[in-house]
Image (spheres, coloured by chain):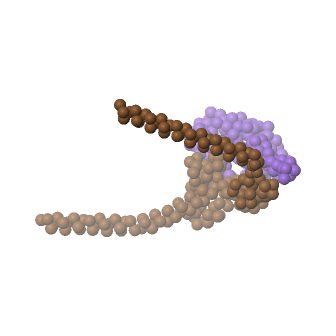
Chain colours: A purple, B brown
Amino acid sequence: MRRYLGWVLPLLSLPVLLLLGYGLTRDTFILPSPLVGNEAPPFRLETFDGDTLGLTDLRGRVVVINFWASWCGPCRVEHPALLNIESLYARDEVALIGIANRDRRVDSERFLAALGGNWTQLIETNNTALDYGVYGLPETFFIDREGRVARKRVGAVVWETARATIDSLLAGPVAEVGDEGSSVPAVDEQGS
Amino acid sequence: MNDWRAACRTVSLLAVGLLWTGAATPAWGQDADSTALDDMTAEVASQLRCPVCRNQSVLESSSAVAREMQRLIRDKLAAGESPEAVTEYFVGKYGEWVLLRPEPSGMNLLIYLLPLAAVVLGAGVLHARVRRWVRAGTISRAGAFPVVAVPSQAVDSVSATENEISGGLTARSARLSAENERWLEEALRE
């Protein structure tokens, strides 16, 4: 029996150690999304200006959908990266869309007035955030010209990676497919 | 006068009773439907993981996203969707991760089989170890008491010690009795 214990115990403890190592080294803010690689959920929402906009209206362009709220700290952190996207890319090539989620309209407008940005802003209704599997804010979806979700960003957008993603999507229909997380975690609601 | 008052009271009570039952009957029907819907919503919500919590179901959590999910579950069930379809919707949006109890298939099988394998393995190791002890004579086949081989010299030594202690106690007891008697006799004399 003792001669078996010499290799059975290490063999049994190996998977446990591997699982422990995996659990300790993974970023818990990165969650797999079944939407990546599939058609983006359609929506038609009201803009801050009172018009309506649907995803189908943007077909043929690379679409960047950013779920945000005025009370969300990481949304403030990522705002300069979104301003960069707006200024660098032509609107007929890249459509940057903000969807204000779990926020009061007046607070959203005050946030934008303070930090700038003229991209289209939509008011979240009809469970659009749940359709996109959003759980915290901010979350950003990069959608290719064909209307498929190419990448999901959880937490604040980082300019360099956002730019690389958009450039690769402009170059082809579906670029590198995957999920990514952020060192600035997403938040659920004010104060959390 | 008293009869008139009693009659008025009876009529009033009847009127109130009729009004109450008339008003309550449809409400009861609605309440029953609403309760069934609430129960179904709770059942589905209890199986889904709150996306922003740590190991909490959508039912248990009071976070904003959990409340939104509960509302959507209820809306979908009220619209006639089955609980399975509603669960499938959330799996399609959040992945299987959203299920608190994942389907026992593929890699998920490990979650269900590993504890069972550990129990079987542990029982096997224990069985082998006990058989080895029985063979070595460390324990009896009945397994209740250990069989310990005691040398005969040790048994003799223990017996001798026991006799010694027993003899000593008897002598001391006899001595004490004699002293007590003497003391009693002196006390009576005085």
- The number of callouts visible is 0
Q: Residue at x 56, y 48 (%)?
A: B62
In the image, is B187 to the left or to the right of B165?
A: left
> Residue B58: x, y in percent?
60, 52
Task: Looking at this view, name the residue that lies furthest to the left.
Answer: B1
The quadrant the C terminus of chain B occupies is top left
> Residue B55: x, y in percent?
64, 49
The quadrant the N terminus of chain B occupies is bottom left
Q: Residue at x 31, y 66 (%)?
A: B17
- Report if residue A1 is visible in the image: yes
Front residue (pair A79, B124)? B124
Vertical arrangement, residue A56 with respect to residue A106, above or below: below
Vertical arrangement, residue A164 with respect to residue B141, above or below: above
Task: Looking at this view, name the residue that lies furthest to the top.
Answer: B190
Front residue (pair A187, A57)? A187
Front residue (pair A56, B8)? B8
> Residue B82: x, y in percent?
61, 66
